[in-house]
Amino acid sequence: MAHKTYTGPEVGVTFDGEVCRHAAGAYAACRVFDIDKRPWINPAVADTPELAQHLRDVISRCPSVRCASWSIPSRHKGLPRTGNP
């Protein structure tokens, strides 16, 4: 599995499923992750600065360090989403 990238209005997320085996801890901690949906990572849910920060905090605790997040610059907010559908 290659790196996958997901972009929301406030924050983007990358994930490497071949390396990250600790995602279960993130499921309960953040509603951005929903294993019953595809894609199962939906950063569009983190649509406020507070929820985006919560997502960044959850990702920062990833023990494999194979998940990453970044802030969407304000000049890009409102533009069409990119990344995996």
Image: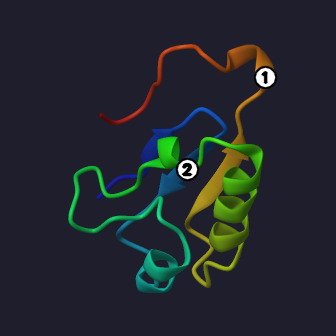
At horizontal 58% and vertical 49% (from top left) the residue drawn is 46
Which residue is identified by label 2? 13
Amino acid identity at mark 1: Ser
Which residue is identified by label 1? 74
Image coordinates for residue 83, horizontal then vertical, percent = 42, 32
Give above or below for 57 relative to 79: below
Q: Name the side, left or right, on which 70 lies relative to 23.
A: right
Q: CA distance from mark 1 to mark 2?
A: 17 Å
Nearer to me, 34 or 63: 34
At horizontal 54% and vertical 37% (from top left) the residue drawn is 8
Q: Name the side, left or right, on which 2 lies relative to 80.
A: left
Amino acid identity at mark 2: Val
Give above or below for 27 relative to 45: below
Q: How many marks?
A: 2
Q: Name the side, left or right, on which 55 lies relative to 41.
A: right
Q: Quadrant of the N terminus?
A: bottom left
Q: Name the side, left or right, on which 58 lies relative to 49.
A: left
Nearer to me, 48 or 66: 48
Image coordinates for residue 25, horizontal then vertical, percent = 49, 86
Q: Residues within 10 Å of mark 2 (few under 14, many from 20)?
A: many
Nearer to me, 67 or 29: 29
